[in-house]
Image (cartoon, rainbow, N blue to C red):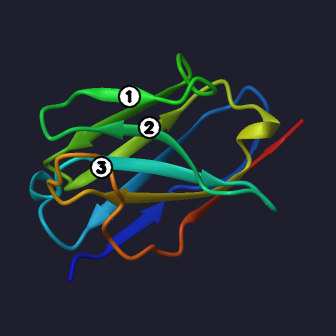
């Protein structure tokens, strides 16, 4: 069973940057589309970015132009570079993958996530 582990979160001031990493127990290249979600306190989990096995990316409107998702096959990770962070970016960030399904659906058991806190 594939496991994903998120890392790289922390406390940062508004306007700052963080880089999150999603590590996999399987080859990242075998996972299909990989996505990053976030969950703010008291809110539902929100999909913020996805990257297909071919490298096509998609972003939520709230993060376009500030976040970049990328695969690093050498490190076997999918990273989320977050710039110009805002307090509303605060939450627990999770990654997941669709295991080559023909549409986006998170198919891996959720990990612990990594906490991102942006202070104003």
Residue 88 on image: x %, y %: 78, 38
Residues under numbered marks 1 and 2 in contact, where contact means CB atoms less than 8 Å apart: yes
| Circle nearer the N terminus (1, 3) | 3
Image mark for residue 34: 3
Judged left or right of residue 56, residue 90 is right
The residue under the point 31% across, 48% down is: 104
| Circle nearer the N terminus (2, 3) | 3
Look at mark 2 in the image and give the residue it sits on.
Answer: 49
Position of 66 relative to 21 (above/below): above
The residue under the point 36% across, 39% down is: 50
Q: Quadrant of the N terminus?
A: bottom left
Look at mark 1 in the image and give the residue it sits on.
Answer: 58
Residue 43 on image: x %, y %: 75, 56
The crowding category of the residue bearing disc 1, from other C-alpha atoms within 10 Å (few below 14, some 14 to 19, many at least 20), is: some
The residue under the point 79% across, 60% down is: 41
Element at label 2 = strand
Q: Quadrant of the C terminus?
A: top right
Element at label 1 = strand
Residues under numbered marks 1 and 3 in contact, where contact means CB atoms less than 8 Å apart: no
- The quadrant in which residue 14 appears is top right
């Amino acid at each position: 069973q594939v496991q994903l582990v998120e890392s790289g979160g922390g406390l940062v001031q508004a306007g700052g940057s963080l880089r999150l990493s999603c590590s996999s127990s399987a080859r990242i290249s075998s996972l299909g589309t990989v996505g990053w979600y976030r969950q703010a306190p008291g809110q539902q989990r929100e999909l913020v970015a996805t990257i297909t096995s071919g490298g096509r990316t998609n972003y939520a409107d709230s993060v376009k132009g500030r976040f970049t998702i990328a695969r690093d096959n050498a490190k076997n990770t999918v990273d989320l570079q977050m710039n110009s962070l805002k307090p509303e970016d605060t939450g627990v960030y999770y990654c997941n993958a669709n295991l080559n399904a023909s549409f986006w659906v998170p198919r891996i058991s959720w990990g612990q996530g990594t906490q991102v806190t942006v202070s104003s």
